[in-house]
Image (cartoon, coloured by chain):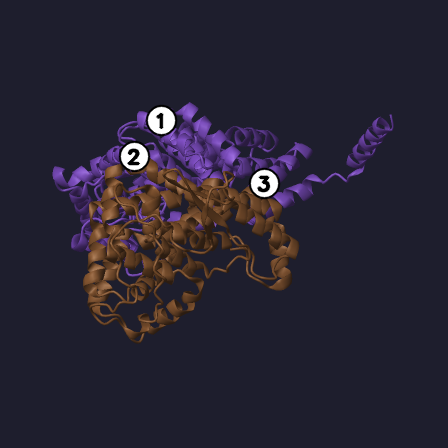
Chain colours: A purple, B brown
Amino acid sequence: MRALTLVVMLALVLGGARDVEPAESPAVLLERAHQAYRQGRFPDALDAARRAAQGAPRSRDALLARGTMAEFMGEFDEAARAYGDAIALAPNDPALHYALASLAVRLGDYDRALRELDTIFKSQPWPAQLLFRYAPASVQKRLMATNRVLAQLVQLQVDILMEKGDLGAARQTAWRYAIVEPGRDYCGESKGPDASRVSRDERFTRLRLATLAQPTAGDCIWWYGQYLTDDGYMRLGRLIVTEALKHGDSEERKQPGYRYVRSRLAGGSEVPKRAESLFLAARQRYLRDGDVDGAERLLDEALRVAPSFVRPYTMKARIAQDAGNPDAALQWLRRGLEADPDSWRTLHNLGRSLLELERWEESERALVKAVQLFPEDMEGRLRLARALYAQGKFDRYAAETRNAIQIARGWSRGSAVAGAATFLEKFDRWGPGAAPPPAPDVEPLLGYGQD
Amino acid sequence: MRRLLALLGIAAVAALATPAHALEVYRWIEGATVVYSDQPPQSGGVVLTSLPGREPLPVVIAPDAPPADAPPVEAAPAETAAVPPPPEPDVIVRAGSATVDEILELSGMRPQLPGIVRALGAEYLPPAGQLSEHDTALIGQIVARHFAPARLYAIIRDDFRRRVDQKGLDSMAVWFRSPIGRRITALEIAASRPEVAPKIGAFAAGLKTSPAPASRLELVQRLDWVTGTSHEATELGLSIAGSVARAAAASAPAERRARVGLVERRVEEMRGQMAALVGQNVLAQMLYIYGPLSDAELKEYVDFLASPPGRAYGRTAHNALLHVVREVADRTALEVLRAVPPQRWVSAQKAAGATAPR
């Protein structure tokens, strides 16, 4: 009886304590959301923004913050609702329409995005509208410098045109609105002496401008496509790489490009933009935030939207591997290969996982195909060499290792394979040894990393 | 034979402390079998040996080995000549088919196992004074229970039995029963004594100013190649490090717990650095241990280890030892950190400014 009384008392006290706890104001929560975002605590930022919007459902700022944070975290439906609610409160606010347009691009709803841009345009003063429509490029440059809304609008318009596959219109827009300058060698700048010193983002930007400004700069367009592919932009990546292939001088020289599309960009099949964006957000949530549940939920959604999109499978495999569940990882990789049998990354990772489990023959099969699809896969070749060595296939071990070392030295990665080279020298001198050959991680080439 | 080298490799990496507890192993004969146990025989049979005495098991028949202090054919470097030869084993002779026990005895695996086990187990022990006496004793008990040589020996022996047939044992025995084979095992056992460790350290330091002859270096490099000693020592070290990392991760609160696969990756990242360190030390130790041998004798040894029976022995011994250590390591680490949670190590470390649990 006394115990029951105590339980009731505790419930009352604790319940009361919760009731008297001072409620945080939406303004405080909003500031907290922004602060968390600035500090890179993105899940906290979203949580605070949600609470701010719930506390102040008619606050434009709170709704915009909720939409922005939700979009950033891959909660696209939540973001769309928040932007929609905000626009209902402030229909002429260009920032809200821009946010919605940007989200629509992320989800591949380009018509919706263009409608939002149209609304933004009409919200501008009429002199600006006139100048935007009719002034020459020299005037547009000044207009863009003074009118941030229009400058953003043009950038998004270029993105939309590129993603829709109309690179010609995107280039015209870039010229017309002075995003690119005539006569400037953007491609040369991206390869210039300071190229190795600039950040990856800066290099990415230079290559984008080169693609827009210099239609014949095949190598820069090719690199831009590879950057996009590495970052997970499947749709734009495939469009740009395909564009680069137009500049190859012979069918033979185009073969690596075709192989690249096949092995890295899902061949000819189109990946829905929503699935691509879900994957990108999921990867960030897992790698950046350590949010396993959130990442898995987004990946599951991506697979529902696009069951043949291979990257969510490899990401699920990685999560399973990190959780110490190699069997589940293998299952995800195999499912990925059912979806896309020519995915180099999936084969490479499968070979690696099987190698760690000492399943030599299966590992060999996966890695043989991986290096066929990407002959400069140094790491894959060294792992294949290890699988061969373990099976006593010493001649092929030596051949694969020699190949990998030669490729690595050609790509300034000799130090990464130094151990493998030393091992091979000993093998040549003394025959097979007791220890397995090293299979080090080797920094991947452009276009084959990040996943 | 090469178990000694694995042990030394580990020791070089971790600068091991010797645990306070003694490890007793009893051996006796039941019928045709040599039995090892940490308990004396209940049958009241005759106990042959009690470890840690390191006397080799009196099982083997072979022509008498030459005295271990016999002069080598070629003069050895002065630094290595001081290796004290072990006393000649008091063997009981038995001809005919070889047994697993005999091979493990003659190869030095059995006599050196308590030392290996002690060194590996010491990896879990705190530096002196870091933890309370109670905690230190608790950890010592856990380690002693898991790293019990008799139990580990039994597992290794069973593993050997499963993997090697009679023909394989007989072909291994040809070398291990030979005078040169026995002499080399004696050298390895002698070098595994704790009191020899400082001499090996001094010898290794001396190599910087007076390096080994190229021909000898080539031989020990090949020895390491055919035995995979450096690799094995690295694997053992990583097994211990990994067990502690996994147990520490498992003992963290759920919301701050590192994922198992990520822990494995972190441990794997240690491999390169550890392998380089181990590799250097193993070569120095080999130069020391085999210093009393002539190049011709050492080459004979290397040739045996590169031969099918030698490789079979090495492979089986490697797998057996690694398998047993991996199995025991995880259980030990979990139990140690359950008994003395990481917070206690950390707070004790902060208080004393000592090093973290190894």
Residue B183 in view (yes/no)? yes
Residue A193 place in picture, x, y as percent: 28, 61
Please name the amino acid that badge 2 sits on.
Leu
Where on the picture, by quarter, is residue A45? top right
Chain letter of the residue carrying label 3: B
Q: Is residue A396 left or right of residue A145?
A: left
In whole angstroms, how far apart are the C-alphas of marks 3 and 2? 33 Å
Under circle 1, the secondary element is helix
> On the image, numbered disc 3 is attached to which residue?
B255
Which is nearer the N-term, disc 1 or disc 2?
1
Q: Which residue is mark 2?
A: A347
Circles 3 and 2 in contact, beta carbons < 8 Å: no
Q: Residues within 10 Å of mark 3 (few under 14, many from 20)?
A: few
| Quadrant for the N terminus of chain A in the image | top right
From this view, report whether residue A310 is shown above or below residue A36. above
Distance of label 1 from label 3 (alpha carbons): 30 Å
Q: What chain letter is assigned to the residue under label 1?
A: A
Q: Residues within 10 Å of mark 1 (few under 14, many from 20)?
A: some
Q: Circle 1 sits on which residue?
A: A335
Q: Secondary structure at mark 2?
A: helix
**Residue A364 placement (x, y as % from top left):** 25, 36
Q: Amino acid at mark 1?
A: Arg
Q: Amino acid at mark 3?
A: Glu
Marks 3 and 2 on same chain: no
**Side of A201 where A183 appears, left or right:** left
Percent across and percent down for residue A375 are: 21, 42
Q: Could you tell me which secondary element the residue under label 3 belongs to?
A: helix
